[in-house]
Amino acid sequence: MRIRGADRARWKQVPAGMRDQTAGEVAARRAVEERLRETFSRWGYREVATPAVEFFETFLHGAGPGVGDRLLKLVDAGGEVLALRPEMTVPLARLAATRLLPAGEGALRLAYVAPVFRGQERGSGRHREFTQAGVELIGVAGWQADAEVIALAADALRAVGPTGAAISVGHAGFLRGLLRTLSDGVAEAARELLYRRAFAELDATVPPGPAREALRALPVLRGPTALARAAPMAPAAESRQALAALSAVLEGVQAYDLPVRVEVDLGLIRDFDYYSGIVFEAHGPAAGLPLLGGGRYDDLLGRFGYPAPATGFAIGVDRVLDVAQRAVAERPVVAVRYAPQAYREAVRVAQDLREAGFAVVASPDDGAGPAAACTVRVGTEGVAVRGAAGEVAGAQDDVVAAVRTALETGA
């Protein structure tokens, strides 16, 4: 184990990509999470949870060997290599394939809100710990399921408030069909260049021909005419089938009165290799990174021993907060101040107010005299509130009513 010298005073810091959160930041994040939970629940998705730590090989098995460098790894006392989850789709696929589907639960609509962890490159500026909220629709094939998940993603964006967001939809099969016309080594290199959007390097990697022309055109194959423009560039049957499937999903999405714009983007490439069909992302006008992303992954559950179709998405809670900058009003705190001789009375009053649903802090007040042995104050302005008898030691209902009136009127 390596420990850096004490002269760096690293005990005062947090690791790169990690961060502390203030009470206000936590309140804002919790508010977004609760809005998302409510949205998922209204669509019939039930929240589940998986461990933050799984076996390292679980993610290699589910997401492929390329995910290894992106994991935060640790070794337990027995020498077992473990990893913090980098996303939630693989853990939920494992849960569904090993427990839920074998138990005969049929179609699964699962939801989650959970922290995930990435081993990001130094200096990337990205967080290594962040919160994802999302859904997985497992055991249902067809364009109707994809349309449902895209519509739910749009509803989730509406619920948390980033304005001007748009959802881009593509199909992994279109690119896959193009790459199948190339040799394995060239196809792998080309996919990596496309993911990094290093389009200028394609000419040096892909030999001349229809595939290279189609790959070079991917950045502009977006918008209302993208499907028509892409059709002549689809030499492989898989690419043509992908265009037809994408057209059906877009038609299905039109049945929903979506609060965000949906557009075609055939150059869309997701960051995990288990996606097999429809893929989509959402961007906001001030967001450099996607606010959410997802798609269909029909082959993933089979890797865990129980083949089943599946589709879903994850929304980045922290990214939404950065874009929406929604101010969350903190819950008003009622302050109970008491002189030493009124301690028991103050505790009783504080408990009465908490049971009535208020946030209450009780603390000594050296300035409180015998005539005002216990005083209730509402909010930051320190407005005094007293019961009907002129003292806070009056009946419980009087105190609760007075506090409620003060909060409603701002008196």
Image (spheres, rainbow, N blue to C red):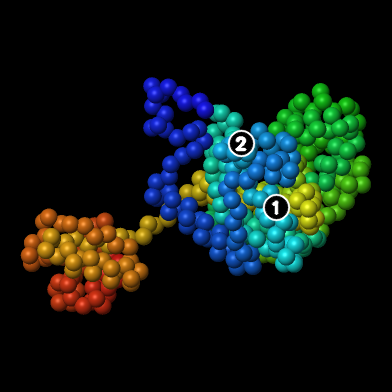
| Residue depicted at 92% across the width and 47% down the height | 237
Quarter of the image for residue 61 reads: top right
Local crowd at mark 1 within 10 Å, few (<14), some, or many (≥20)? many
Q: Secondary structure at mark 1?
A: helix
Report whether residue 272 is seen.
no
In the figure, is residue 170 to the left or right of 10? right
Q: Position of residue 183 (x, y in %)?
A: 89, 31
Q: Which residue is mark 1?
A: 94
Residue 122 screen position, x and y as percent? 56, 28
Q: Amino acid at mark 2?
A: Gly
User: Residue 106's quadrant in the figure?
Assistant: bottom right
Judge left or right: residue 341 versus residue 241.
Answer: left
Q: Report crowding for label 2: few under 14, some 14 to 19, many 20 or more residues within 10 A (C-alpha).
A: few
Q: For the residue labelled by badge 2, is the local secondary structure a helix, a strand or a loop? A: loop
What residue do we see at 78% from left, 56% from top?
Answer: 306
Label 1 and label 2: CA atoms lie apart by 23 Å
Mark 1 and mark 2 in contact? Answer it, CB < 8 Å.
no
Could you tell me the amino acid type at mark 1?
Arg
Q: Residue at x 30, y 60 (%)?
A: 333
- Left or right of 38? Residue 404 is left
Q: Position of residue 300 (x, y in %)?
A: 76, 50
State the residue at coordinates (88%, 27%): 207
Q: Which residue is mark 2?
A: 79
The image quadrant of residue 262 is bottom right
Quarter of the figure with the C terminus = bottom left
